[in-house]
Image: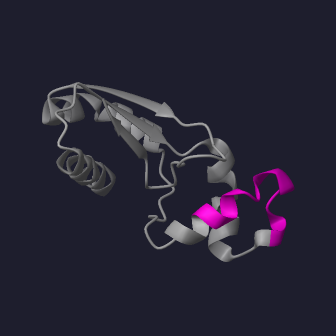
Amino acid sequence: EDYITRTIQDTREIIKATGMQPGSISISVVPDEIKKIFPLLVKGDMSSIPPDRKWIIPEFMKIRNLILQYDGDELSILNENKHFLETTFSCSISIEKSAASRRGKNAWPGRPLIHIQ
């Protein structure tokens, strides 16, 4: 429930900041490769992070205080509440796992990426 409430609040803030009336909303949750190394990041065990994922460290350091330490199945929770979200925002909602990206933003545990179209 807290996860859905926070997602709704974040979405409303984006709508307010952009002034857009959404035709659709895309919500992307944390990809498995970030979810797997998240506990290492939280513990500060940077040496155990695989070399091909070290690029995640600077982004994590910037936003570590904003990330919920949430270990639930975000994809399932959002899918279970999809109709409620569509009713709340009066538009279609797509929900997916995001791909980790070296460029741009990434979804984090408890902090999905929200795109308004």
Give the left or right position of residue 82, taking residue 40 as reference. left
Residue under the image location 48 percent in, 42 percent down = 29
Q: How many marks?
A: 0
Q: Is residue 51 magenta?
A: yes
* Percent x, y of residue 44: 69, 76
Give the left or right position of residue 32, taking residue 52 as reference. left
Give the left or right position of residue 42, taking residue 23 as reference. right
Q: Give the magenta part as a residue range.
A: 47-59
Which colouring convention does the figure follow? one colour
Q: Is residue 61 magenta?
A: no
* Percent x, y of residue 22: 21, 31
Give the left or right position of residue 10, taking residue 66 as reference. left
Q: Is residue 94 above or below residue 97?
A: above
Residue under the image location 54 percent in, 69 percent down = 62
Residue under the image location 37 percent in, 42 percent down = 114
- 41 or 79: nearer the eye? 41
Residue under the image location 82 percent in, 50 percent down = 52
Magenta span: chief secondary structure: helix
Q: Quadrant of the C terminus?
A: top left
* Percent x, y of residue 76: 43, 36
* Percent x, y of residue 78: 36, 38
